[in-house]
Image: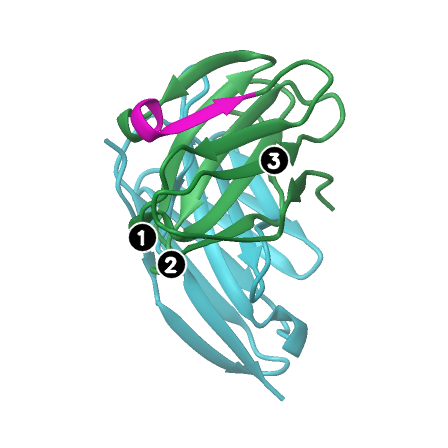
Chain colours: A green, B cyan
Amino acid sequence: NSKVIQTPRYLVKGQGQKAKMRCIPEKGHPVVFWYQQNKNNEFKFLINFQNQEVLQQIDMTEKRFSAECPSNSPCSLEIQSSEAGDSALYLCASSLSWASAETLYFGSGTRLTVL
Amino acid sequence: GEQVEQRPPHLSVREGDSAIIICTYTDSATAYFSWYKQEAGAGLQLLMSVLSNVDRKEEQGLTVLLNKKDKRLSLNLTAAHPGDSAVYFCAVRTTGFASALTFGSGTKVIVLP
């Protein structure tokens, strides 16, 4: 069973508000991924980290999203100004390394609703 | 980029019967293959993962088959039970530094008693 912990489980925000969610990766996992799953079950990769360093991120993440994985603190993903289209399940996953053969373990997600 | 197609989108089976879900992918550099289960309102639970050097893997009532020639990955749930009712996703990765998973569109499985 995955030990990736995501909080909060549910998040409700108005348009234009900030939305922040957190992720504690599995112990000993330095690599963290964030994905967005929309209501049509489409997954979008947002950003990934190795320890505190961003490895890859998509354009959307660069502009309205900010994310970090500080040492000795939970990773976080924050939407600076929420839009209705941001309503989705945000999934955090961690792995032992960045190698493509490495398994990703997912948390339970944060379900964001933007009113 | 990688394209993954998953079918069927919906699957109803009787308890004790088998269910098969198939994914096809396009990128010949795909090296990692996995199946996840998502129950209502929950996150993704890893069921099984295989690398490209594996053709078949069985674990706890699940069988994963990989046909690299046809670029096809399948999940067989043998002897399904009501607890198997969920949405199942295949997810693959190509070789490369920190490559992201590409997911299938999901199969909603309902196991009828």
- Indicate the chain on which mark 2 is placed: A
Please tell me if label 3 and label 1 are on a single chain.
yes
Q: Position of residue A37 (x, y in %)?
A: 41, 49
Badge 3 marks a residue whose secondary structure is: strand
Please tell me if label 2 and label 3 are on a single chain.
yes
Q: How many marks?
A: 3
Residue A6 horizontal side relative to residue B28, left or right: right
Query: Which residue is more in the foreground, A43 or B64?
Result: A43
Q: Which residue is mark 2?
A: A115
Q: Which residue is mark 1?
A: A84
Give the residue type at disc 1: Ala
Q: Which residue is mark 3?
A: A22
Closer to the chain start, of discs 1 and 2, is 1
Find the residue positioned furthest to the top.
A53
Give the residue type at disc 3: Arg
**Distance between mark 1 and mark 2 Cα atoms:** 6 Å
- Does A63 lie within the magenta span? yes
